[in-house]
Image: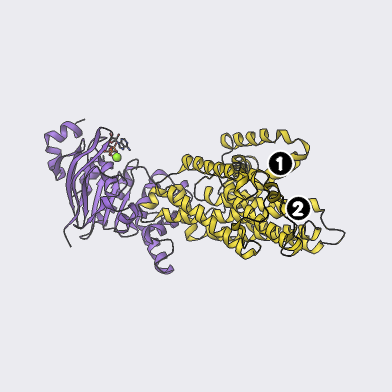
Chain colours: A purple, B yellow
Amino acid sequence: MSLTALLVDGVTVRFGSFRALDDLSLAIDYGEVRAIIGPNGAGKTTLLDVISGITRPKQGRVLFDGATDLTEISEAAIARAGLRRKFQKPSVFKGLSVRRHIAIGADVGFRARLDAPALEDRIDEVLEIVGLADQAGRLAGELSHGQKQWLEIGMVLASDPKVLMLDEPVAGLTDEETERTAALVRALRRPDRAIVVVEHDMDFVERIADRVTVLHEGRTLFEGSMAHVRADAAVVDVYLGR
Amino acid sequence: MSRIGPTSPIVLLIGLIILVAMAMAGLAGTEFALSRYLANAIGQLAAFAVLAISLDLIWGYLGILSLGHGLFFALGGYLMAMYLLKHSFEITATVPDFLQFMGWKDFPFYWAGFEFFPYALAVAVVVTLLVSGIFGYVSFRSRVGGVYFAIITQALVYVAMLLMFRNDTGFGGNNGMTGFTVLFGWPMGTSGMITALAVASLLVLAWVLLGCRWLVGSRFGALMLATRDDETRLRTMGYETLRLKLIVWCLSALIAMLAGMLYVPQVGIINPRVLSPELSLEIAVWVAIGGRGHLVGAVIGALLVNAVKFWLSSAAPEIWPFILSGLIVLVVLVFPNGLMDIAKFKFVRPMGAKRLAADLGESRP
Ligand SMILES: Nc1ncnc2c1ncn2[C@@H]1O[C@H](COP(=O)(O)OP(=O)(O)OP(=O)(O)O)[C@@H](O)[C@H]1O
Ligand SMILES: [Mg+2]
């Protein structure tokens, strides 16, 4: 197995004449938690959209495990290959129960594949991890903002993904919830998993990230440890200093 | 998986439908039997209720609005009419009006075999699956949804109407097909036949309700709701929503076709007006009024609106279009969930909105 989980190779995304991603290249390894930061509109969400197949780039490719070009397969196929992503805007199914969400995330297919007891165990386990065990029977539409964020995280990690992408997982959360999310992300780190986190909360990023990529106007401005990021004049200038 | 208690609305409704069917069958021929008019009206209403369910399945549970469901209803209706005419001709040698009108001596070649009901049924199923399958695949494949899909379905039913208005197609033209005299070897128009058709429609309605309830309560049904609520979210978890949508869309078309097959022998005629955009809009109004995403609501909506329409059609037919338009405006602007909103508003608040919502909500997992 290659150590590189994702290789983003010369990706350009245009919206009209505007380049949301501009010949962007970066590599994300197994075993790391990679934070992607940058000012609003830097292209962070667009990058995740490209990786998850929602946006097709004009140019470039995204290699998964060194072999599969994700720009050529469907969103569903990308997910089934082992990539999962939490959206920036909490995306849950308002008419379904919390429990059902985890079932949908854990056991992919029109018909159940896992046997019932195994699935139930897995659901209980995930609900415990994301702290929603006491909400299992509620409809997602009735949950608070923070609970929706956690539900979506639970739903995407239920399948034990090889690549886990989280777009602003602590936006709108309380300090205590943020703290728990940080602990969760660190606990999910595994040698055979890559975790990509987009976030604006620098203290949170500092706690979870092994490496940080700073995006600016669709390009990489800087890559390194959080300590180096904070020390970099260009980063301070376009992002942190403001 | 949702559980259905013995007093949940859907169980009560199915029980009621079966009870009415049994009572009608049992009392037939006695002095307590319903009048022919009433029995016939019940049968037609049951067919409309089946049609409403077919639309609710894709609109309420999958979020896909079709404003052209009259197409599949008409497909079933026309193919049933072809069977009836061919069968009647075989037994009584009555030449259908439209053939005489066109000066044709014999049925066109593509009417061959229609005197045999299983063949007519098979053709109806195959044609419905072909039309809905191809149209659905092309639309869902290119991710056409929402308003655009609704508009295209409306255009489709309109094109079909224009086509059927032509007299040279061999499907009855603007006069349509009528003069059905025999069904399964029995004379039509007798009280016995009217009762039998109404009872059959009620039983089909009960079955369709039961089947759809089972479907929406299953794992597949949960995925339907997930597709409705956030299709991209579901797709990016590994689900091919195209397949799911196509399956439900074709199933819905089949149910609408079935409703058409039940409807035509009871009303005794089919003509291109069944394909008018208004009728297709009206189906959406039934469902909207009953509260989409609730099977019981769809049935109640179909019954209520049609009861008013039946009554008005004798009292003041010219105001029906105004009433219909008014209902559309009301549902869109004031009660997006139809009767469910009104129920919650009026009676429920005091005794706990949660409980009634839970009772009514058979869409809930
Ligand atoms: N579908 C689209 N059509 C047109 N422009 C778009 C589209 N999606 C994104 N953009 C633009 O591309 C740029 C990058 O957007 P993106 O959402 O990737 O930013 P971001 O880094 O995630 O920002 P934020 O921190 O605010 O979430 C923005 O200027 C945005 O307006
Ligand atoms: Mg973003």
Q: Position of residue A49 (x, y in %)?
A: 29, 45
* Residue at figure coordinates x 69%, y 57% from the top left: B85
Q: Which residue is mark 2?
A: B40
Within 10 angstroms of label 2, few (less than 14), some, or many (20 or more) residues? many
Q: Is residue B57 left or right of residue A61?
A: right
Q: Secondary structure at mark 2?
A: helix
The one nearer the camera, B272 or A24, is B272
Q: Is residue A74 left or right of residue B206?
A: left
Q: Position of residue B78 (x, y in %)?
A: 63, 52
Q: Earlier in the sequence, mark 1 or mark 2?
A: 2
Q: Chain of mark 2?
A: B
Q: Is residue A37 above or below residue B30?
A: above
Residue B309 — which label? 1
**Viewer can see residue A98:** yes
CB within 8 Å, label 1 to label 2: no
Q: Inspect the image, locate mark 2, and give the three-letter code of the amino acid beneath it.
A: Asn
Q: Position of residue A226 (x, y in %)?
A: 16, 43
The one nearer the camera, B230 or B31, is B31
Q: Inspect the image, locate mark 1, and give the three-letter code of the amino acid beneath it.
A: Lys
Q: Is residue B24 left or right of residue B66?
A: right
Q: Residue B196 occupies which quadrant of the picture? A: bottom right
Within 10 angstroms of label 1, few (less than 14), some, or many (20 or more) residues? some
Q: Residue A1 occupies which quadrant of the picture? A: bottom left
